[in-house]
Amino acid sequence: MEDERRPIWISVIVPVYNTVDLLQRCVDSIRRQTYRNLEIILVDDGSTDNSGALAEKFALEDRRVRVFHKENGGSSSARNLGISKARGDFIGFVDSDDYIEPEMYERLLQVAVEENLLMVQTSRDEIDEEGNLLPNVCEPPKEPELWDCQHFMRELLLHKGDCSFCTKLIHASLLKEERFPEGELNEDFYLLVKLLPKISAVAVMPWQDYHVFYRYGSNTRTKRKDEFPQVFTDIVKNADRVYAIVEKEYPELLPEAMRFELFQRLDYMLHIPISMMNRKNTFYCQVKEYLRKHKEDVRRSPYLTKKNKTYLLLLGTAPKFVRKVHRLLQLLKGKGNE
């Protein structure tokens, strides 16, 4: 895969935005990697705290650290700038509020070289602001596994796979032409499903070497009950995109892809504020019409639970009424989300 006469280099890209209180832990965890041939690219995405200055301090302390400053444009634009500046043979990503285990990149690179792979993946855990370990979003395998890309795609469509780029080491050649979509959330999923048809397999490691710091107030996490995060719109758009990819590349997975289309719309419909469920909201109307047109797909799907099917069928018919009942049930359980 690589020229054996020279060492393999890894570029680790860290988008930085107003995380001055967490950046030290993040960067230290990368600087402590047992694999030493790496560069750390810190992209200051227009921070208004002292994150940019702290990043420059790291660069003075460690020659492997390179810092770039830009106007605020979001995580995707910061990652894309980092990709354009990266010199490594492989690229990894770490969010500035997260941290990693010292052996993570050495383990991933060893597997990539031994198996001649363009993408390898570690496992992760999540920790909240109080230091509590949260339930696993993606269950790690009990031992290392090698998934062909159709299997990996199927796991994603069934919400079992990990779409995060932070848990992955990727050969730089995969990112020469492809980039993260700017101005959208759920961006990791968007790019990953575009890359999968270009590779043969992905190794999935059992070690939870990546630690996600679950911080309220980030793009996809909020405590405010009246907010409707953009991510719920973007997951529906990505469901349509992945269906088109599956139709072309993995037609055997069309039942799973339809399940994904329906499930993402269910997520959207159960989170949109009732006040936004009106005729002026074009996107909402499109989602409602999709559910009405695909009632038979809902009924026939072997991958939806009975509860999923009931909600989907009712949401396509009387969405506001269903949401009011759903809200009441959630309040009775002490889980009101509006």
Image: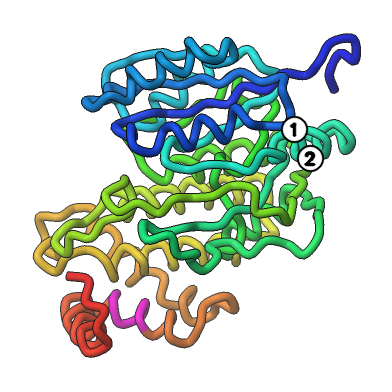
User: 50 or 11, which is in the foreground?
Assistant: 50
**Dots 1 and 2: beta carbons under 8 Å?**
yes
Q: Which residues are magenta?
A: 311-316
Q: Quadrant of residue 337?
A: bottom left
Q: Amino acid at mark 1?
A: Leu
Q: Earlier in the sequence, mark 1 or mark 2?
A: 1
Question: Which of the numbered marks, if any, corresponds to residue 304?
Answer: none
Residue that appears at 30% across and 61% down: 287
* Classed neighbour count for the residue bearing mark 2: other residues with Cα under 10 Å, few (<14), some (14–19), many (≥20): some
> In terms of secondary structure, where does tag 1 sit?
loop
Q: Amino acid at mark 2?
A: Ser
Residue that appears at 46% across and 76% down: 298
Looking at the rendered image, the quarter that the C terminus falls into is bottom left
* Residue pointed to by mark 2: 200
Image position of 259 with respect to 324: above or below? above
Question: Which of the numbered marks, if any, corresponds to residue 118?
Answer: 1
Image position of 7 with respect to 288: above or below? above
